[in-house]
Structures are given as structure tokens and as C-alpha cells.
Amino acid sequence: MKAIQVKNLSKTFKVKVKEKGFRGSMSSIIKPRYKSILAVDNISFEVEQGEILAFIGPNGAGKSTTIKMLTGILYPNNGEVSVMNINPCAKRKQLAYKIGTVFGQKEQLWTHLTPYDNFKFFGAIYDLADTVIEERINELKKTFELEEFINTPVRNLSLGQRIRCEIVASLIHKPEVLFLDEPTIGLDPVVKENIRELIKKMNREYQTTVFLTSHDVGDIEKLCKRIIIVNHGRIVLDDSMEHLKYHYLNKKIVEVKMKETVDFTAEEGITVLKSKGGNLKLAIDTTKKKINDALRLIDADNMIDINISNVPLENIITEIYRENKVLL
Amino acid sequence: MRKYIFIFKTTFLESLQYTLNIILGFVSFFVVLFVFLNLWQYIYADSTNLISGYSMEQMIWYVIITEIIFFGTRNRTLTGQMTSDIKSGTIAYNMNKPYNYIYYIVSRHLGEITLRFFLYLGIGILIGYHFVGGLAGFQAVNLILIVPVFLLGTLINSFLRMCISILSFWMEDAGPYHWIYDKIIIVVGTLFPVEMFPDWAQPLIKFSPIYVVTYGPAKLVIDFSMEMLWRVLLAQGIYLGITIIIITVMYQKGVKKLNVNGG
């Protein structure tokens, strides 16, 4: 079953334009001028139930605008949206019972209350009976390891603890789809890892569909099997992580330490990324040169050390962003 | 309804953290009361005199009650907070919850002002008793009928404030309109009863929100009559209906043109 269906979705914002100086200020009062910004441009995609999808793109690409249209906060100018077979614009309140949202940059918890009181509050606004709320808190308390600080006011929690509580608050009503907008922003690597594990566990145990946006490649790499990249409001890539990592750029990175300097600049399919003395960093385009052919060019007797790796996902994504800019 | 009661309860619990801030807010309340206590005591050189039908005790109690209503129900949630939520797009984070944003704000507002209102009420009554004594002819049993009038007045005041804040969907800053409303209420609605104003101005004031928010409830405390009660309740009913319609229409239209900053 499809959890999310989006067809030809577009959103345009009208932004006031003001010319500089006093004259500009006066004329904007008398005759205001506006320009239209196309934030989301005719995008279509589907998400299966239970899937964890990464929806990424550079700043201003249209990610958050899309999430806000999927949750019924913003009204699209064109296109159709369906989340759990509900039109978010027409039935936002009904949809609210089926979805959960975590915005890493915006806290929804009441800071003077304890996480426990917050969970009771969120349970009540989702019309859950007191006994159900208690059961749910106990269950999530164990899953997200909150025992230590569940009775400490939120304002006294660390960022990592607060994010865990934010996620629990958004799960209290057992949502079928969870929208995570940069959930690990500002967290240290250990806490990030912990949060990712908990998201995976939640997806496994409750079959929750997760729609994730993040600038952190680690989140995407460790959580998602599928990735959608948006740029300038358009989908520029919708692919599996496997395909993206191993086939999209067809490149291997070879780092080699030689006794003497070697020149590879004339070789087709090999790009010298760095060369300092005997230390070389090469990018091999495997569509033009097989990796074993490239390795044959290196004199084994002259070699001290070698390391072959895939292109980091971060570089692949950056490359896609750049390519898209050039194309447009 | 249960969820709105829960929102009220949660906000009330949170407001207990700010008791000291509320007590500090008494300063301006005391200053205004002190000035008007002295002013009226000076004007009523002979305390048996009546001015515009009010005895000195009634006049001072009128000012005390309207000041309690004004200071006790003043709250940033309905003004600056709501305005900045709309302008910055933060309102969006409340919209994907299964409650009506307008009722959510009203519940929060009532939760935030309850403690403050009762603190001002207690202090105001103590000041009144200390300076002018009890009100002649006041019957505690009438309070059963007066309390709903106070509640409706507070609710209408909240709705009028929200109407102004919702303008932020279309305007850069609704702050000046709140300032004007504030000044009209404090100058025309709290310091002098309607009868003190020129004859031509009185009908205007009686049709204005002042009649249902401050004058009506205060007048019923100092000079209760069933006729006045029905008149105030009727006016409050009309105001309540109109403000609810205006808020609903404005909110539904405004939300459709919401611009959320940063996406």
C-alpha cells in the first residue's frame, strides 16, 4: 500500500519586492510590487508503507515546503497529494491523527514541563484515554531509554535527550507516517548514532513510514534505502541508495603512496585529485577504465601503500546538486 | 472539549512558574489605582455627593474592577506572540496538530491569565476595602449572575484581540492596532464610567466593545439590576457571535496565504 502519493505538485510564493532607499520605501507603500518564487515545481513521487525515504536537497530546494504541503500546513497551487489516502488540505485535522512530525529546529515540547507531562498532554490532544496514554508512555520510555530523565523539566535536558523526547511526543498516538525534518541537527556523533538506531528500531517494531529530510549524509546512508534529491523545486534523482552509491557516478577513489612521483595526468579515465610528492589521490572512472587496468599502471615495486574506496556519498550528492545547477 | 481543558490545565500549571513575574507586574496596577484613588477623593470633597449618578465608593470600586479586568487579562499570547507566529510562520507547527488553532490559543490564554486575574482580584478587593470600605447595596448572591458576564467579557476581549492579530496575515505589523485598542480600553473603558462622557459620545461607547468588556461587568458589581444584566448579556451575545464569525472567516482566508519562512 502507498503511504504517500504526490502527483504534479507545485507551490509558488508571492514575495514583496522593495527597491532600495527612501524613495523605494515610499513607492512600495503606494504601489507594492511582488515577484513569484516557484518553490516546488511539478514533482511526483510515491512512498510505500513502512519505507524510510530520504528527501534531500540544498537549502531553498523545496524540501520543507513539500513536507509542509504533505502535512496540510501549506496549500499547493497545483497538483494532488494523498497521505494515507487523505488529502492533507481538505482534511488536515483527520490527517493529524495518522502522522507525526519532528522539526529538529523547532521544539514542540513545553519546556517548563517534564517529558512525562508533555507526553500526557500530547496523548490528550490526540484523544487517547488515560490508560492508553500510560501504556504508550511506558512502552516508548523503554524503547527510547528515557527512564533517567522522564521526570526532569525539558528545559534542563541536553539537546540529544530533548530530541529523543520530541520523537516520542510525535509517536505517542502511533502515527503511520513520521515526518522528520533534520532530526539530528546540532547533535554530536554519538547522540546522532543513537537517534538513528532508535529511528530504525521504531521503523522495525511499529512499521512506521519515515519521510526524512536532512543535510547529514550519515542519517541518509544509515537509515534510508531510497533517496529523492530535489533542487530548484524539481526532483533531480529518485533512486535506491545502492544504485546511487555504486552506479550513479561509476567512480572509485584510489589513494596511493609511491616511492617516487608518478604522472597519471595523460591517462584516460583517471583524474588526479591530489598529488604531493609520492602521495597521490586518483579518481577512476570505471566506465572508461576498468579498475584492474588502472591498477596495472601502478608499479608495485615502487608502491608503499594503497587504499581503494567508493566515492563518499556526500561527494555524490554535491556532484548531483552542482550538475543540476549547470543544467538549469 | 477534553483536549482544550487539558491545554488550559497545562498552561495554568506552567504559569505557576511565573508567579514572581506576575507580582512584579503589580507596580503599574498600583500606580494607576493610587492616582485615581487620590483624584476621586479630591473631586468628591464631600463624600455624600453624587457625580453622574455615582457615589465616591461606587466610582472608586468601578475603577478598581475595570483595572482588575484590564491588567488581569492582559497577555502577550493574544497580541505579540500570535502576531509574530503568523509573521514568522511558526503558526504552521501548531496547525498540524488535531486541534483548532483558535480554540488552542484561547485555552492557552485563559490558562495563562487565570492565576494573574485572581491575584489582581484579591489585591484589588483588599485595596478597595482598605480605602473606601464595602459597597453599599452589594449582594454576594448576585455574583452567581455576574461571574458569567465577566467570563463572557474576557472571552470577547480575547476574540477582539485575535481579530487584530489575524490581520498579520495581510499586514506587516498588527502591533499599532493593538496599541490603539489598548489605549481606548484603558482611557475610555477603565478610568471613567460611560456616564461621565458627553451625551453625544455615550451612545458610541455603549455600542463599542467597552460596554461588554469593562463597563457592563463593572457596572453590574457596583449597581446590580436585572434589566442591566439582560442588556449586557444581549450585547455580549451579539459581540460573541460577530467576533466568532469574523475570526473564522479571517483565519480560513489567512491560512491559505500563509508564507512559512525557510520553507
Image (tube, coloured by chain):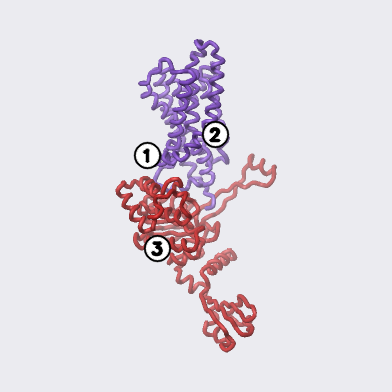
Chain colours: A red, B purple
Q: On residue A200, which mark appears?
A: 3
**Mark 1 = which residue?**
B5
Q: Are marks 3 and 1 on the same chain?
A: no
Q: Position of residue B170 (x, y in %)?
A: 54, 41
Residue at the image point whose x is 40% and y is 42% from the top: B10
For the residues labelled 3 and 1, say whether their Cβ atoms are less than 8 Å apart: no
Question: What residue would you read off at disc 2?
Answer: B178
Residue sitting at x 45%, y 55%: A163
Q: Amino acid at mark 2?
A: His
Residue B177: percent from left, percent from top = 56, 34
Q: Position of residue A307 (x, y in %)?
A: 53, 79
Residue at the extreme left:
A131
Q: CA distance from mark 2 to mark 3?
A: 49 Å
Q: Amino acid at mark 1?
A: Ile
Sequence order check, earlier mark of 1 and 2? 1
Q: Provide the secondary structure element on which disc 1 rests.
A: helix
What chain does badge 1 belong to?
A: B
Residue A5 versus residue A92 in the image, above or below:
below
